[in-house]
Image (cartoon, helix red, strand yellow):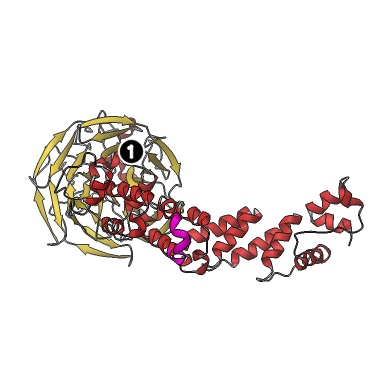
Amino acid sequence: ISKLVLSAVSDYFAAMFTNDVREAKQEEIKMEGVDPEALRALVHFAYTGVLELKEETIESLLAAACLLQLSQVIQVCCNFLMKQLHPSNCLGIRSFADAQGCMDLLNVAHNYTMEHFLEVIQNQEFLLLPTTEIIKLLASDDINVPDEETIFQALMMWVRYDVQHRQKDLGVLLAYIRLPLLPPQLLADLENNKMFSEDLECQKLLMEAMKYHLLPERRPMLQSPRTKPRKSTVGSLYAVGQGSTTIEKYDLRTNRWIQVGSMNGRRLQFGVAVIDNKLYVVGGRDGLKTSNMVECYNPITKVWSTMPPMSTHRHGLGIAVLEGPMYAVGGHDGWSYLNTVERWDPQARQWNYVASMSTPRSTVGVTALNGKLFAVGGRDGSSCLRSMECFDPHTNKWSMCAPMSKRRGGVGVATYNSFLYAVGGHDAPASNHCSRLSDSVERYDPKTDTWTTVSSLSVPRDAVGVCLLGDRLYAVGGYDGQTYLNSVESYDAQNNEWTEVSPSSNQAAFKVVLQHFWLRGPHCPQQCSNAPWIFQLFVINWRRIYHSIIEITLLKFGFLIYPDFLRYWKACIKIRNWF
């Protein structure tokens, strides 16, 4: 065998034969830890450039190529294994790639495992994983599952496969399950399960999760890595456009936008809401014609249907869902600014007027928080507004709240952790709305009726869409005074900072509002009618969403001694669930 030939294809042999080492002068070199057949194949490749790849020998061939530093062979073998990925072998390939230091193969195998997790856990490879590898899986935010309960059940399936040896690690493993995000009924059942009740670490984790359900008003203070939803469980963000009428979807887990559908036709300054996993597009205008039309879009069937119209034609209206019904707030009817409000009853399928606001508001931000409807800023025809008022559906009355520090028309609003956020917007007379665009953000605390300024956006955004996705607020698109934006920023409330994420495909003004995991919207200013694109956003959560109404019936919890908390867990709450 020629040393020159081997040195030409292998960095390992090149270093061996061109440096002053013992092997450089030897006629015979003993190779330890290398499969003989793999070595023979690599030598054959060095002379002929021909390499035969087989499933049964590919791993030994790649291991030898990594040892001998044959970069061409490594790449070819990795590509071969990437094409062989399957739910039954991806975990093994992932582990093998990690051991060999093949980072490209490792990343592809890891992403495949995350994407096909529901199929992976049905295979023997998953059940045979060591504890350290199970921890790596459970710790990932990128697992593609419909809900946290799926991951919990996968863990329990793994534990029961060898319960005698694995139960001792249950407390450690359970720390990687987001227990506060499990249904409360399941938590109550686990309390009586001996596998958990006899493990102190498990009991501590269960108590943490129970507190999260029992004390919803304290959830902002109970945040931890276990209260952060995994990316696949928070839903998808949809941008419903006009102009080209496209509908785009943003997937948080993959950080990508894709086109998924289209609207029936152009419509500007409409409102959107989500009821029963369907998108309602309400009002708006086409040119100078203001509409009272309501259309409903099913993201699964991609079919639009016409619903009963509103009583009043409205564009620039605010839309939100509160305790079932949908509210159409303010706007402009083509002649005047409106303070009237209509409520859609999804059961009766009809619109009815409720109490009017104290102030006419168009391009108003509307959202629901703590059982009330909030109308934020907007325009009254002469100027932008600082004021905010809230509607109590039980008394059918509006009341004024503390005003913002800035006037904001076209403001984006969303709620998170019991706070209301007002983002961007503009403050200007109707003749020149672009002269004072805002990048500032304010946060409203309903407990103290006060506003606080938080970190600003990276750029001014008028008519920005703002929504909650997972544990972050997203500001999407808008107008910066010169161009319509396709950039997207996300806000980390814990660190009080905005960071850029993947941009949408189109430059646009956006509008959104939030209720639970659903996103809908505030609105583009009336003067944005020349915008080539205006979008509505909403979030679809494809799994059952558990809402809990919890009534403390025996005592009001301040703090509880640990055993008492568990003893009274079932007795102290009454839970009603909607699916």
One can see residue 534 in this view: no
* Front residue of this view, candidates 384 and 482: 384
Residue 368 at x, y percent in the picture: 21, 45
Answer whether residue 166 is magenta in the image: yes
* Front residue of this view, candidates 502 and 496: 496
The part of the image, by quadrant, that contains residue 158 is bottom left
Q: Residue at the location (45% across, 41% down)?
A: 500
Answer whether residue 86 is magenta in the image: no
Task: Give the overall secondary structure of the magenta segment.
Answer: helix
Q: Quadrant of the N terminus?
A: bottom right
Residue 36 at x, y percent in the picture: 78, 66
Residue 71 at x, y percent in the picture: 73, 55
* Front residue of this view, candidates 3 and 235: 3
One can see residue 79 in this view: yes
Horizontally, residue 249 falls left or right of residue 416, namely: right
Question: Disc 1 marks which residue?
Answer: 462
Q: Residue at the location (44% across, 63% down)?
A: 163
Q: Quadrant of the C terminus?
A: bottom left
Residue most extreme to the left: 395
Give, as a single range, the part of the protein colored magenta.
160-168
The part of the image, by quadrant, that contains residue 5 is bottom right
Residue 325 at x, y percent in the picture: 16, 54
SS of the residue at dot 1?
A: loop
Position above or below: 238 against 395: below
* Front residue of this view, candidates 102 and 131: 131
Q: Residue at the location (30% across, 45% down)?
A: 529
Q: Is disc 1 surrounded by few (<14), some (14 to 19) or many (20+) residues within 10 Å?
A: many
Q: Amino acid at mark 1?
A: Asp
The part of the image, by quadrant, that contains residue 336 is top left
